Image: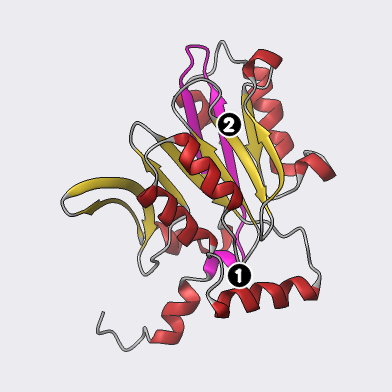
C-alpha cells in the first residue's frame, strides 16, 4: 500500500482482529415458501464508524470463473461472511467457551506448525473447493482449526442449515434446521446456547422471530425487525 502508517506488524494484527475480540449474531430462517435466509450482524460497537468506511462487497474469480462473494474489510485477507451464489452461505461467530491456558498453547502450536486452518481461511478454502452444501458441511465440521469458532452454514433447499460449534478437531455440538419437528430457524450469538441456555442477544432474536412466526416472516422483516 506504500503507506508509512501500515507496516507488516499492523497488517498481521489487522488480520487477527476477529480472534482478538468480536461479537456477532447469525440467524438462519426457513420461510413459509421454503426459501432459506441467512442473516448476520457484526457487533463491533467500539469500531463501527471506522469499519463502515472500509467495508465492501467482493466477487472472487479464478481463471476468469466465478468462485464466491464475500463481505470484506480493507486490509483483511480472510473473510467472515461469504456465499456461493445458488449453493450455500457461511458466517463465522467467535467462540470463547474454553479459557484453559493449555488450550491457548495448543492453538499457538497449531498456528505456528501450520497444522489446521485459521477460521477465516477455512471459510475461504471451503468456498474455493466446494460447490454444494454437503461438501461445505463436511469441511466446516471436520477440518482442523487452530482456534474455536461457531460456523453457520445455510444452503438453498430442504432443511439445509446448521450451526456448528467447533473445537479444534471437530464439532462440540451441532444444531440443524428440522422444520418437520418445528425447528424452522436457528440463532447463534457467541454462546454455547445448547449448554448454557439462550440469553442476551440470542433470547432477543429468538423471542422476536417466534412472535412474528414463520407464516409472516419475510427477508425485510428479518432484517428490519429482528437483526
Q: Quadrant of the N terminus?
A: bottom left
Residue 68 visible in this rendered orientation of the protein: yes
Q: Is residue 29 magenta?
A: yes
Q: Is residue 201 above or below residue 169?
A: above
Instruction: Tell me residue 223's x, y (percent).
Output: 49, 32
Instruction: Tell me residue 91's x, y (percent).
Output: 51, 46
Q: Earlier in the sequence, mark 2 or mark 1?
A: 1
User: Label 2: which residue?
Assistant: 226
Instruction: Specify the farthest residue to the left.
Output: 64
* 139 on left or right of 212: left
- Tell which of 70 and 1 is nearer to you: 70
Instruction: Tell me residue 172's x, y (percent).
Output: 73, 49
Q: Quadrant of the C terminus?
A: top right
* 62 on left or right of 135: left
Residue 199 visible in this rendered orientation of the protein: no
- Give the magenta part as a residue range: 17-40
Residue positioned 45% across, 49% down in the render: 81
Q: Nearer the viewer, mark 2 or mark 1?
A: 1
Mark 2 to mark 1: distance in Å? 27 Å
Q: Is residue 184 magenta?
A: no
Q: Is residue 74 above or below residue 165?
A: below
Q: Which mark, by number, is residue 162?
A: none
- Tell which of 28 and 213 is nearer to you: 28
Looking at the rendered structure, the secondary structure element under dot 1 is helix
Residue positioned 69% across, 56% down in the render: 167
Q: Which mark, by number, is residue 20?
A: 1
Name the quadrant containing residue 22: bottom right
Name the quadrant containing residue 5: bottom left
Name the quadrant containing residue 149: bottom right
Amino acid at each position: 500500500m506504500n503507506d508509512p502508517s501500515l507496516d507488516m506488524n499492523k497488517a498481521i494484527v489487522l488480520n487477527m482482529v476477529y480472534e482478538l475480540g468480536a461479537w456477532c449474531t447469525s440467524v438462519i430462517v426457513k420461510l413459509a415458501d421454503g426459501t432459506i435466509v441467512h442473516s448476520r450482524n457484526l457487533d463491533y460497537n467500539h469500531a463501527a464508524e471506522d469499519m463502515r468506511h472500509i467495508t465492501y462487497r467482493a466477487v472472487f474469480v479464478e481463471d476468469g470463473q466465478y468462485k464466491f462473494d464475500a463481505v470484506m474489510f480493507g486490509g483483511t485477507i480472510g473473510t467472515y461472511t461469504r456465499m456461493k451464489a445458488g449453493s450455500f452461505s457461511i458466517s463465522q461467530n467467535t467462540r470463547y467457551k474454553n479459557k484453559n491456558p493449555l488450550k491457548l498453547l495448543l492453538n499457538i502450536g497449531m498456528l505456528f506448525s501450520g497444522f489446521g486452518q485459521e477460521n477465516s481461511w477455512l471459510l475461504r478454502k471451503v468456498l474455493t473447493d466446494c460447490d454444494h452444501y454437503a461438501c461445505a458441511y463436511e469441511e466446516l465440521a471436520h477440518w482442523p482449526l487452530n482456534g474455536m469458532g461457531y460456523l453457520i452454514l445455510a444452503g438453498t433447499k430442504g432443511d439445509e442449515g446448521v450451526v456448528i460449534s467447533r473445537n479444534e478437531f471437530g464439532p462440540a455440538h451441532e444444531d440443524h434446521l428440522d422444520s418437520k419437528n418445528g425447528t424452522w430457524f436457528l440463532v447463534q450469538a457467541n454462546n454455547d446456547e445448547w449448554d448454557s441456555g439462550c440469553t442476551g442477544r440470542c433470547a432477543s432474536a429468538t423471542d422476536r422471530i417466534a412472535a412474528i412466526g414463520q407464516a409472516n416472516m419475510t427477508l425485510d422483516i428479518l432484517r428490519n425487525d429482528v437483526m
